[in-house]
Image: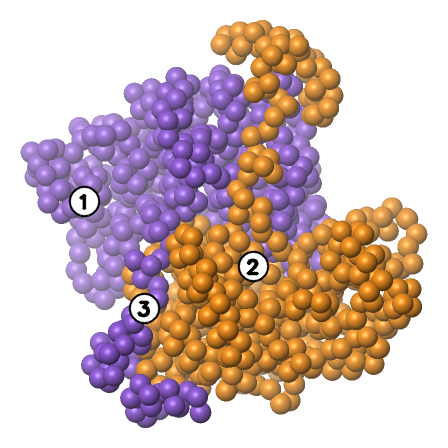
Chain colours: A purple, B orange
């Protein structure tokens, strides 16, 4: 009755069922006159608009899936509709998504996952005993012996134990405590959760978070969302993207004028830059963090992706402990790993973990509380993480096949890293640092002044203009350097090295041809 | 060199390798004197403390996994260690975790998931054809035909299409657009994402979010985290926890003095209160939202959990469209569903979806951007969601078994709902409204004044004191009403009805016995 009266009051007439009137404009055309008298009410205004929305969310940018990727999607649809292009497919070299590029899952991992998913298979003779053993162990630790139960918010106990054992092995015996392991929904979730706890303050005491330039834009996005301050330190492109403590010092000194620098984020091996930090460099960074009282975030998701024979992965945790108790008992550190990278490339399962060192027990409690609001990370992703840290060992039935598959993926990646570096460096106007690790090339490209002008006319960053043209002319989707940050006046793009070898060769040749034509056109 | 010099400067001596010095106190005992001169430096202070952390995170509370659940964990460990208790196991009736309570997964769902996980099984004769068909369709829509690839941030296209088709069927033909469907990491993720976009302003223009009392504490937790304002409206316990528009009107009027009420959250069927809203009530609420310009959040994760023969689930979307284009073209609505509840109870996969109605296209773009920072929801959870919305149909091989399993779960739940209501209402000092839907009882308990005093002496809310005693004496873990909100001076607890029938009978009998003794003790 009340509603009916209100409708009459507003001059609404009955409608035939089915006339849903979903279009705003047609609805507006039918608007009764009385609505115009009450412009603050009624259908024409929305509550949630660009003006009224959370301004911090509005400020977020995320280039890896930004406008160029939306454009790539449009082009794919056009190709599907039969629209002719100078190419037949879009190659998505914008994101480290190995299996989408044809990499096959590690058989053992998927066998264990299938057994956990559908335990009837535990009776099947077509699954190896070591896979069954792993699956039984995981299921026994799950509520109701099922992946379908919530786990503890911090993650399944036995999986956290396996992660701790893995870290201990990796770090040559430096102990890891399962109580310091938090399983996460991919590494991104861990990074944003710990940053969320860390930021505070307003005005000049807003938390400053030091991030490299170039950086992986998850960091800038989360910092925007949390209304914290990005403090940039530049990696040294002339020196293989090395990190220098002098540059950290400059950055923190300048930042103290306008914020409270409290966190230092390091990505090693680098994304998008592919460098692998030396032990000496890590030691210097830890000393700097200790001196400046900075909380360290070590993004180590590419720890298995080291290709250069001169480089080795050193974990921040290990170096911290080797520096002695002065450091190892005081520097607060969170490090991150993931199922998405390495040799397994299981991005879709969203598995990951975070190890925290020297976290105050009360803060650990706060972390558990915060995580408990979202109940738990996906248990299937937790199970995938377990296989990553607890793979077949010599003597087990699946060891040989597992090793073969692992070496094949990593060997291919190493070849592709070298191939990419070599080919880019043969192109005039492109310079590419060695791809020591991770999964990306981040070459510097010369963009002629006339192209810069043309970009400005299109209100685009010059490297966005370059990448858009590359996409439109070749179907190759890469991400402009401006999405990661770069020194003023330099231009780059990030390209994954994930396509299969032969395809990657074609991609590189196409980029080369495009680049030469581009230089010519805008000479 | 630099570090070595610094160590000497700070008076550090060399340590034998292996003496990691992880204990703070022993490290302090060995601290060299020079450190005391520079108290602002060194190991004894942490960067991240309860004082320095994000105060909004500190303010978060989440009772469903709060102190009582930590206590339950401690008791379980004590039982494992052989410590004698008046009971042999902890019964976790604190959380809607069906499979942890012994509910079996729906066979068809797990078959499809196993096939997607390990596609070699597509050749196995032990899997039904309809499951294989579903699995092939999902895999074809995944990058590289693998659950291991990232999906689009909004979710896999064909799964969003299946969700839209499901909603259209559910709502008797009211159309749903796949473009309005966002797959999420459980419903919690969707709810917190949309709230994150909605909140803005400071001081008196801070966003007010209307939530029921009692409410599911995800809402209060996210509102704290976002520094928005909770605007409480009380459900009417005397009237089966009904929602009254007069109460909404009171709440919004009073809220306008100190914030900008912009969002109205409704949980239907209710959590923790178990009521199912009438169509009339939903219509009134929508009219109120329209009138007051409120963005509607409809938490409909219990849409399959309606037990009372007098009740039916009506979706907000359907009622909105039936109210005519004046409403259906203007009221902004987000509704949520999940794989975790219903008859499948797949909590661990963290699958869910959100449907948005009348969202401004620019805001949809903002939503996609925000979601893209976390890349995508777990693809395995998306696949689970697909089976929930696209189950076997008559004529398909698996239909009969699927229907039998589904009816068995829902039939049991209906019986347990009635059993729980009846038994609680036989106990003096306990009153329980009908459990029309969802998975919980939220009985009101009389707590004698002497017990209230005893609770105060322990610095506990009276119902926390009651629930702690219940846990310690019987091993039954339930959540105090104070974690959900309740009218001043009333006390409740939330208990799931998920234990198997015979076990639930025992649980109810134990609660009854405990309660009688409690009344006697504090008479």
Establish whether labels 3 and 1 are both on one chain: yes
Q: For the residues marked 3 and 2, what is the alpha-carbon distance in whole angstroms?
A: 25 Å
Q: For the residues marked 3 and 1, what is the alpha-carbon distance in whole angstroms?
A: 30 Å
Q: Nearer the viewer, residue A409 or B388?
A: B388
**In the image, residue A319 lies at what x, y percent?**
57, 22
Establish whether labels 3 and 2 are both on one chain: no
The chain identifier of the residue carrying mark 2 reads: B
Q: For the residues marked 1 and 2, what is the alpha-carbon distance in whole angstroms?
A: 42 Å
Residue sitting at 51 percent across and 83 percent down? Answer: B281
**In the image, residue B61 lies at what x, y percent?**
61, 53
From the image, state whether disc 1 or disc 2 is nearer to you. 2
Q: Is residue B381 left or right of residue B158?
A: right
Residue sitting at 84 percent across and 77 percent down? Answer: B428
Q: Which residue is mark 2?
A: B220
Q: Is residue A4 left or right of residue A357?
A: left
From the image, state whether disc 3 or disc 1 is nearer to you. 3
Q: Earlier in the sequence, mark 3 or mark 1?
A: 3
The answer to whether residue B168 of the structure is visible from this angle is no
Circle on res. A460: 1
Q: Nearer the viewer, residue B482 or B69?
A: B482
Specify few, some or many for label 3: CA neighbours under 10 Å numbering under 14, 14-19, or 20 or more: some
Tell me if label 3 and label 1 are in contact, CB under 8 Å.
Answer: no
Tell me if label 1 and label 2 are in contact, CB under 8 Å.
Answer: no
- As helix, strand or loop, the secondary structure at mark 1 comes to loop
The N terminus of chain A, quarter of image: bottom left
Q: Nearer the viewer, residue A107 or B492?
A: B492
The chain identifier of the residue carrying mark 1 reads: A
Q: Is residue B76 left or right of residue A520?
A: right
The chain identifier of the residue carrying mark 3 reads: A
**In the image, residue A14 lies at what x, y percent?**
32, 93
């Amino acid at each position: 009755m009340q509603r009916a009266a209100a409708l009459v009051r507003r001059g609404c007439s009955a409608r035939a069922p089915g006339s849903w009137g979903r279009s705003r404009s047609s609805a507006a055309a039918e608007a009764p006159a009385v609505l115009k008298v009450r412009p603050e009410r009624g259908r024409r205004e929305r509550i949630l608009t660009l003006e009224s929305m959370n301004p911090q969310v509005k400020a977020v940018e995320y280039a890896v899936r930004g406008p160029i990727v939306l454009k790539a999607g449009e082009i794919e649809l056009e190709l599907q509709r039969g629209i002719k292009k100078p190419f037949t497919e879009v190659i998505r070299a914008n994101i480290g998504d190995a299996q989408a590029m044809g990499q096959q899952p590690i058989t053992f991992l998927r066998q264990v996952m299938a057994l956990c998913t559908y335990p009837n298979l535990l009776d099947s003779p077509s699954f190896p005993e070591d896979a069954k053993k792993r699956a039984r162990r995981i299921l026994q630790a799950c509520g109701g012996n099922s992946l379908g139960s919530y786990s503890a918010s911090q993650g399944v106990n036995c999986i956290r134990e396996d992660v701790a054992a893995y870290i201990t092995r990796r770090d040559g015996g430096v102990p890891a405590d399962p109580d310091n392991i938090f399983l996460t929904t991919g590494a991104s979730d861990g990074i944003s959760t710990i940053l969320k706890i860390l930021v505070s303050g307003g005005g000049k005491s807003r938390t400053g978070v030091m991030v490299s330039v170039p950086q992986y834009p998850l960091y800038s996005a989360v910092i925007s969302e949390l209304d914290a301050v990005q403090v940039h330190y530049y990696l040294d492109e002339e020196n293989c993207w090395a990190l220098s403590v002098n540059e950290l010092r400059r950055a923190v000194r300048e930042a103290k004028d306008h914020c409270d620098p409290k966190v230092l984020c390091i990505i090693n091996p680098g994304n998008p830059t592919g460098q692998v930090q030396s032990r000496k460099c890590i030691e210097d960074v830890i000393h700097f963090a200790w001196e400046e009282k900075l909380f360290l975030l070590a993004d180590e998701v590419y720890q298995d992706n080291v290709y250069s024979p001169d480089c080795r992965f050193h974990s921040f945790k290990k170096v911290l402990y080797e520096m002695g108790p002065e450091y190892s008992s005081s520097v607060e550190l969170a490090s991150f790993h993931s199922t998405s990278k390495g040799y397994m490339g299981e991005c879709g399962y969203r598995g990951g973990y975070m190890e925290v060192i020297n976290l105050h027990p009360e803060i650990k409690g706060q972390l558990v509380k915060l995580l408990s609001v979202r109940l738990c990370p996906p248990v299937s992703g937790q199970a995938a993480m377990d296989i990553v840290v607890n793979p077949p060992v010599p003597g087990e039935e699946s060891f040989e096949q597992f090793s073969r598959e692992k070496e094949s993926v990593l060997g291919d990646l190493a070849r592709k890293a070298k191939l990419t570096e070599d080919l880019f460096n043969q192109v005039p106007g492109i310079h590419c640092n060695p791809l020591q690790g991770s999964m990306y090339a981040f070459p510097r490209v010369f963009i002629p002044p006339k192209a810069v002008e043309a970009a400005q006319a299109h209100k685009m960053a010059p490297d966005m203009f370059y990448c858009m043209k590359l996409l439109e002319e070749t179907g190759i989707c890469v991400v402009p350097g401006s999405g990661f940050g770069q020194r003023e006046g330099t231009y780059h793009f990030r390209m994954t090295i994930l396509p299969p070898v032969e395809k990657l060769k074609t991609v590189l040749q196409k980029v080369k041809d495009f680049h030469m034509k581009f230089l010519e056109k805008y000479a």
